[in-house]
Image: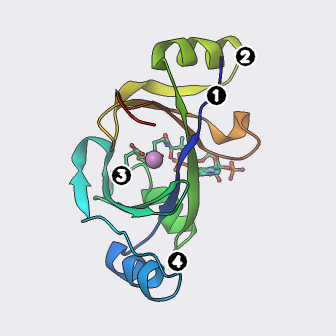
Amino acid sequence: MKLGRLNHIGVATPSIETSIALYRDVLGATTIGEPFDLPAQGVKVCFVDTPNAQIELIEPLGAASPIHGFIAKNPAGGQHHVCYEVPDIHAAKTWFESKGARVLGEPRIGAHGTLVFFVHPKDMGGVLTEIMETPAGAH
Ligand SMILES: CC[C@@H](C(=O)O)C(=O)SCCNC(=O)CCNC(=O)[C@H](O)C(C)(C)COP(=O)(O)OP(=O)(O)OC[C@H]1O[C@@H](n2cnc3c(N)ncnc32)[C@H](O)[C@@H]1OP(=O)(O)O
Ligand SMILES: [Co+2]
């Protein structure tokens, strides 16, 4: 499998509005999207653009959110996952499984509208890893 570009770094936060102020007023981000709910993934999302990748701010949507436990352990929030692009999501899933890495569930539509899956952090050197199919026409 050929790994593609780093698409985003997921940053969990208890408050997207508070994080937006940090990225805008302290870090100097100039392009920040509108927050939106992604109920299928159990998160509220907001993208912050940097010149070479995005920061994906994620806030839990309810107690069943996959990041509910992370925020409970890290109440101020923190770096949650990294996301790499691949040309073929199904080939990538087969690749990770063949390497003995635990793929968490089936590919599903992520925040960029393409299929994504996650690989368990314990099989990725302690880093929760998201793999997403490159959007058509990107780059
Ligand atoms: C916005 C949509 C989408 C996109 O398109 O970009 C997203 O990014 S959604 C992002 C949120 N969704 C997910 O994270 C889905 C996949 N995650 C999961 O299935 C779970 O979060 C998890 C990775 C299986 C962890 O489950 P959880 O119940 O929260 O924790 P555990 O206590 O079971 O954790 C076991 C073990 O792993 C460590 N851990 C947990 N989260 C992380 C993390 N983000 N980074 C590194 N390590 C993590 C946790 O500390 C435990 O370790 P030990 O304490 O040593 O046992
Ligand atoms: Co993500």
User: Eyeballing the image, is 75 above or below 71?
Assistant: below
Look at label 2 and name its amino acid: Lys
> Residue 42: where, in percent of width, then height?
31, 49
> Residue 49: where, in percent of width, then height?
44, 62
Whether ligand 1 has any atom under 8 Å from the Cβ at mark 3 is answered as: yes
Q: 119 left or right of 113? A: right
Q: How far apart in space, not on screen, are marks 1 and 2 (Cα)?
A: 14 Å
* Label 3 element class: loop
Q: Which residue is mark 2?
A: 99
The tag on residue 23 is none
* Label 4 element class: loop
4 or 2: mark nearer the eye: 2
* Label 2 element class: loop
Name the residue at 53% across, 53% down: 53
Q: Of label 3 and label 1, which has the lower sequence position?
A: 1
Q: Of label 1 and label 2, which has the lower sequence position?
A: 1
Can you name the residue that lies furthest to the right here? Answer: 125
Instruction: Quadrant for residue 94, please give it.
Output: top right
Q: Of label 3 and label 2, which has the lower sequence position?
A: 3
Q: How far apart in space, not on screen, are marks 1 and 4 (Cα)?
A: 31 Å
User: Eyeballing the image, is 94 above or below 104?
Assistant: above
Q: Dot 4, how many residues are within 10 Å of its Cα: few (below 14), some (14-19), or many (20+)?
A: few
> Residue 115: where, in percent of width, then height?
37, 28
Q: Of label 4 and label 2, which has the lower sequence position?
A: 4
Q: Could you tell me which quadrant the N terminus lies in?
A: top right
Q: Which residue is mark 1?
A: 3
Q: Which residue is mark 4?
A: 76
Q: Which residue is mark 3?
A: 65
1 or 2: mark nearer the eye: 1
Q: 4 left or right of 90? A: right
